[in-house]
Image (tube, rainbow, N blue to C red):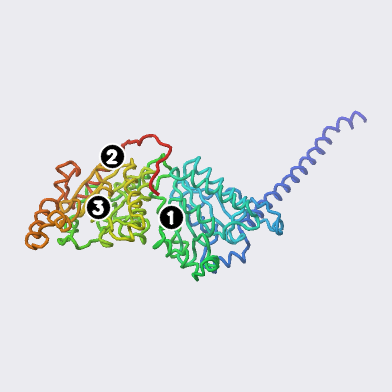
Amino acid sequence: MYLQNFANLPNFAFRYVGMWVKQAQSFKRDIMKDILQELEDRRATARLGGGQKRIDSQHAKGKLTARERIDLLLDEGSFEEFDMFVAHRCTDFGMEKQRPAGDGVVTGWGTINGRMVYVFSQDFTVFGGSLSETHAQKICKIMDMAIQNGAPVIGINDSGGARIQEGVASLAGYAEVFQRNIMASGVVPQISVIMGPCAGGAVYSPAMTDFIFMVKDSSYMFVTGPDVVKTVTNEVVTAEELGGASTHTKKSSVADGAFENDVEALAEVRRLVDFLPLNNREKPPVRPFFDEPGRIEASLDTLIPDNANTPYDMKELIHKIGDEGDFYEIQEDFAKNIITGFMRLEGQTVGVVANQPMVLAGCLDIDSSRKAARFVRFCDAFEIPILTLVDVPGFLPGTSQEYGGVIKHGAKLLFAYGEATVPKVTVITRKAYGGAYDVMSSKHLRGDFNYAWPTAEIAVMGAKGATEIIHRADLADAEKIAQHTQDYEDRFANPFVAAEKGFIDEVIQPRSTRRRVSRAFASLRNKKQQNPWKKHDNIPL
C-alpha cells in the first residue's frame, strides 16, 4: 500500500507544480498588465502637458499645442520621442508639488518627406514653457545627437523665458543650449520657429540659428519687454511694436519670414527643409523635375527696358530660370533692393542672390549687404551653389549710409563671396558699376562662370557722372558734354570691354539664360577648392 501511494506521488507533485506554475503565470500576467497600464496612464498624462484647461486656453489664442505642432511638422507616424517622463528637480517655492512629466518641452526626431530631422517644441501649457535645468538638458541631448548623426535641428519656441524659481540653474541651461547652437553652426542646418513669446536670454538661441520664422500677431522676440522699456526709457510701446513679426521681418532683419498662423508656418518649414542638405558633408537633395534644362525663354529678350533708368522686376528672371518657376524667397520683406532665396536647376538646389531694380534702383546699401552676406555664407557652409544676378548701379550714397558703416557692411558681402568655395555663376543683365561690380561675385572674387547679356554695362560709373569728371573743363558747353557722354556710352556701355579682358566668360542671349546657367552648374558639380588653413576668418562684423 505504501509502495502504491509512493508510486502515485509523482503524479500528485506534477499536478501541484503545474497548478503553481499556472498561478504564477497568471500573477505575472496581471503584474505586466498593471505595468503596461501604468505606462499608458503616464504617457496619457504626459501628452496632456499642463492639462486640458491650459490646452483649451492655447487653442483660444489661435495657437496649437507643442505636440500638435510636431504632428504637423513631421511625416505622419514618424515622431520618436525622447525623455517623455523627465521632471524638474527644483524644490524651492513649492515647486516640488508640481512636477509635470516632460518639463515643458517635447523633444525627439522624425522625418520630413522621408529625411531625418531632430525637433524640440516648447509647451506653453507647462509653466509657460519656461526653461529649467532639465528642460535645457532635453534640448541639449537632441542637439548633440543632431551634430553626431548629421541631421537638421528645428526648434519650436513658445516660452516665457528662464524659470525664475530655479535661479542661476536655468541661466546655466540657456548657456548650454547656446553652446550647442555655436557648435552646430555650419555643421547642420538650424531652424527656429517662434510661435509665442520669446524674451530675454531666450532670443539668443534662435538668433544663432540659420533661419527664423515667426507667426503674425501671436509671436514676439525682444531682449527686454515693454514694461522694462517703459521703466528705463519712459517709452510706451506694445509687445507687437517692440518685437512682433512685422518689426523683425521689415526693420530689424532678425526674422526671415512671417506667416499668418501656426499651420502655414510649419508647412513653410517643411518646404524649406526640402531645399537643404542634412549636414555640411552631404550635397543638397536632388528632386525629380519636370522642366526642360535647355528651355528657351524668348520673353527674356525684352525684359530689359529701352530706357536705362526704367526699372524691371528681377523676380521675373528668377522664376523663368528655375525649375517649374519655383522660388523660395528668404527675408522677402527686408532690404527689398536685393533678393535672396532658393530655387532648383535640374532638380538641384541653387542659392540665388539678385539685385532688384524695382527698389532703390538695385543699389547696394547697409541692409542689403548684410542680408546677402549672411545668405552667401550659409550657402557656402552647406555646399549650395550660388547664382548671382547683377543689375547694380553702385552703393547707395548719403551721410546715413556712411555714418552707419556702409564700408564695413559692404565688405561683409565682398568677404562672403571671396571666401566661398562653392560653384558660383554670375549673370550681369544691365548695370554693373564701380565697387558694386566687384562685390557681386565678379570674376576677380573667384567666380567660376561670369556671363553678361548684350545689354550689360560694366564700368566704373555711369556715363553722365564719368563725363562730368573726365571733361570737367567742358561743363559749361552742353553740346560738348553731350558728345563726350555719347562717346563714353559707346565705349563702355556694353559688356565687350570686360569680355576682351577675360572678365566676362561669354556674352549670352537672354533667352538662353536657363540653358547656359544649367550647363554651367552641371559642369561644376565636382568642383573642389580649398582656402588656406586657418582657425577661422575674421569677417568685418
Labels 1 and 2 touching (C-beta < 8 A): no
Nearest the camera: 211 or 367? 367
Secondary structure of residue under mark 3: strand
Q: Are marks 3 and 1 in contact (CB under 8 Å)?
A: no
Residue 490 visible to an observer of this rendering: yes
* Between discs 3 and 1, the one toward the N terminus: 1
Which residue type carries mark 2? Leu
Which residue in the protein does label 1 denote? 269
Query: How many angstroms separate mark 3 from mark 1 (CA)?
Result: 29 Å
Q: Point out the frontmost of discs 1 and 2.
A: 2
Residue 342 in sight:
no
Judging by the rendered image, the residue that carries numbered circle 3 is 390
Between the C-alphas of marks 2 and 3, the distance is: 20 Å
Q: Which mark is residue 524?
A: 2
* Relative image position of residue 506 (x, y in whole percent): 17, 44
Image location (x, y in percent) of residue 175 = 56, 49
**Residue at the farthest bottom position:** 236
